Image (cartoon, rainbow, N blue to C red):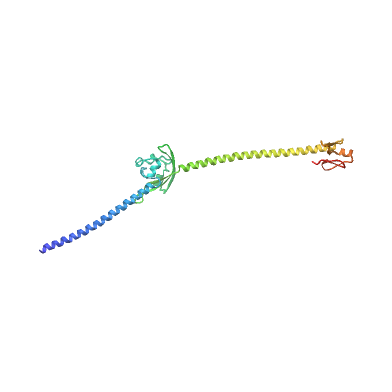
Amino acid sequence: MFYRNKVKKQLKEQLLTLRRRVAKLERLEAQRRKADEEIEQARYDLNQIFNAAVPLCVIAGDHTILRVNDTFCSLFGMEKEQVVGQNCCKVWQGPLCNTADCPLEQILSRGAKLSVYEVDKKLNSGQTISCLITAVPYLELKGEVIGIVENFTDITEHRRTEKELQDYRTRLEEIIAERTAQLTAANKQLEQEIAERRRAEEAAKRAYAELNQIFNAAADGMCLISKDLKIIRVNETFCQMFPMFKLGGGDKPQGKGIEVKDN
């Protein structure tokens, strides 16, 4: 009887211990499920963010494309199955591929923290787009660099706008040069015309002075009469011949009964 009671007591203690362990395991399992759900939610959130972000591509140290997002596939018109696992140089051939300036080589071999370059990509549709590519290190959990993450910015429209602005600027400079040349030529011609007019005026003044000198020095009296019978000019000999007249300003005769025309 004593032995039976002792066994019952031991079994009860073992059962209680077992229940405690089961309860603890259930709590741990609940915590694990909660942690798994949180991890899954975080993975889902990160996946949404990754696919909603700018075009992104993850490249391993051997140039193998590990992952791309939806916007990358949309930009280049490709499916993920066509890209993942391929050599990056085969997906988009850039000027830095297979050179020491390759962004992957810069980051892996030379410890660069950032690499920025431009590349033109011809799509399957035949269209060529221009991209600005920014590469940063891709790290494993321990912080070791194992590849790069590249993001792509479509700058096709920006380049087109720049080219249009450059063409417009070039054309504007050509127009300004043409107008400047025209104005310079016109100004030169105007200066020539002014110089010729001055020479003509000086020649006219000299001719007038010479003719006036000849007119007044003539031995014969000379008188100019207008068609309305007005004396408009006489020379000195004329005045000497007819003392009743005398010269006024501009060789105009002055005297009684004589109508003089003012010019």
Residue 122 % position (x, y): 42, 38
Residue 31, given in percent of the width and then of the height, sits at 28, 56
173 up-or-down from 25: above or below: above
Looking at the picture, tell me which residue is in the foreground, 82 or 58: 82
Picture coordinates of residue 178, whole percent (x, y): 59, 38
User: Is 143 on the left-hand or right-hand side of 24?
Assistant: right
Image quadrant where residue 92 sits = top left
Camera-nearest residue between 114 and 56: 56
Q: Where, by quadrant of the figure, is residue 193 drawn?
A: top right
Q: Residue furthest left?
A: 1
Quadrant in which the C terminus appears: top right
* Quadrant containing the N terminus in the rendered view: bottom left
The residue positioned farthest toward the front in the image shown: 228
Instruction: Name the residue at 28% across, 53% down.
Output: 33
| Residue at the extreme bottom of the image, as rendered | 2
Whether residue 107 is situated above or below residue 19 in the rendered picture: above
Q: Measuring from the top left, give residue 187's x and y in whole percent.
A: 65, 40
